[in-house]
Image: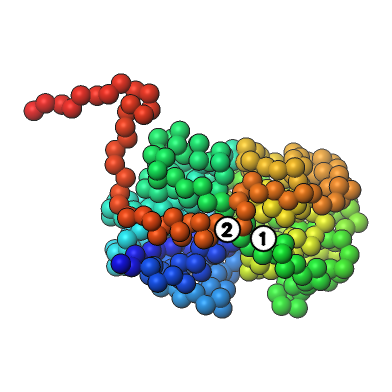
Amino acid sequence: MTDNIVVCMTSRGNYARIGPVLHELDDRDEFDLDIINAGASMIREYGSLSAILEDDGLEITTEMYNVLEGGNPVASAKTTGLSMVEFTNVLNDIDPDAVITIADRYETMAVTLAACYQNIPVVHTQGGEITGSIDEKVRHATTKLADYHMVSTERSVEVVNRLGEDRDRIYETGCPSMDIAKDISENADPDYDPQEQYQGVGEDVDVSEDYLVVQYHPVPTEYESQYDKTWELIEAVDALDVQAFWFWPNMDAGTDQVSKAIREYRDQRDPQDIRFYINMRPTHYLTLVNNSACLVGNSSVGIRECSFLGQPSVNIGDRQNSRERAENVVDTPCEADAIQAGIETQLDAGSYEGSTLYGEGDAAVEMVDAMEGIDFELKGSMDPTRLGLAEVSPALD
């Protein structure tokens, strides 16, 4: 019997976190894969995935335009509502056996709700992780709505279980992006230069010399201060005599303020050793990170993928405040002097020993093997006794 699985892509980061699973599902006769490409991953300014997916041999079933741009919480909330309506229609047409939802963005909530109310089992990846940001609300809410959980770490298993999910529906598979990191670590290209392939904007970077990768995303709960905080990062990087590849922010509330600061920096100071990019395919981006002297910003890549690669990372602010981390991370407040000091510390430190905190690089096989053994069905009600509550007698008519 073949199970029809739908995977919903809604941001450029999704492909790194689920791409190896897509290919594994596509290669197995036991599954019929449908891919919905939607949200920010349909918009060039935030890193469109359509051409990348097709170039990699993955067929897109449906493309959806469901984003209200505005760079503020109202736009995010309205996008979530619109997305739920659109995903409901598409899932109703496909009628899959299960839907895979990814991580913790607000579009994830829309996909999950659309599936739940149509009685379609939901498989959630990267549940149980604690970050300290608003994404955590979406992640844990999705855990409660999901029927199966493919988690990355041992602690995540415990968190999902403590949230009341049955242990036999929780699978510790590792994170699929570690599969990409493992391939890069084993087949390193130390001379990789993205500048001819991806063009970008700004001055040339000499990849034979030290360079930074800068990736700073807005923090939605602090979106009104993102312009000033981005300038703190700019001042820190500008004070150092180090080249950099600087990537555009994602589509969270506050993205317009981050982008504005970056544009002003580029136009007003014309930095001679920085090149700016929107997006790259995951293998190229992680190769660039692997060859860098340090990753700087607040992306989870600095904590997750960099831990596996042993790459120095400077994590800024509270966006990843409570996420599990290895020894490769230096945390700083979003203040220019502190950021500069953190970067200098990591430039002196060099490489770290790689960590398998987020998996050993075989997550796609682990996840799809687990799914082969699942007879997809909706989960039942909570067991009060397992939660330490007294058993409630059923009401009598």
Amino acid carrying label 1: it is Lys
For the residues labelled 2 and 1, say whether their Cβ atoms are less than 8 Å apart: yes
Residue that appears at 89% across and 65% down: 209
Quadrant (top left, top right, bottom left, bottom right) of the C terminus? top left
Quadrant hosting residue 7: bottom left
Query: What residue is disc 1 on?
Result: 182
Number of callouts: 2
Q: Position of residue 16 (x, y in %)?
A: 59, 61
Disc 2 from disc 1: Cα separation:
9 Å
Residue indicated by mark 2: 362
Q: Is residue 35 above or below residue 55?
A: above
Q: Alpha-carbon neighbours of circle 2 within 10 Å: few (<14), some, or many (≥20)? A: some
Q: Earlier in the sequence, mark 2 or mark 1?
A: 1
Determine the residue positioned at 54% across, 64% down.
19
The quadrant of the rendering that contains the N terminus is bottom left
Q: Is residue 224 visible?
A: no
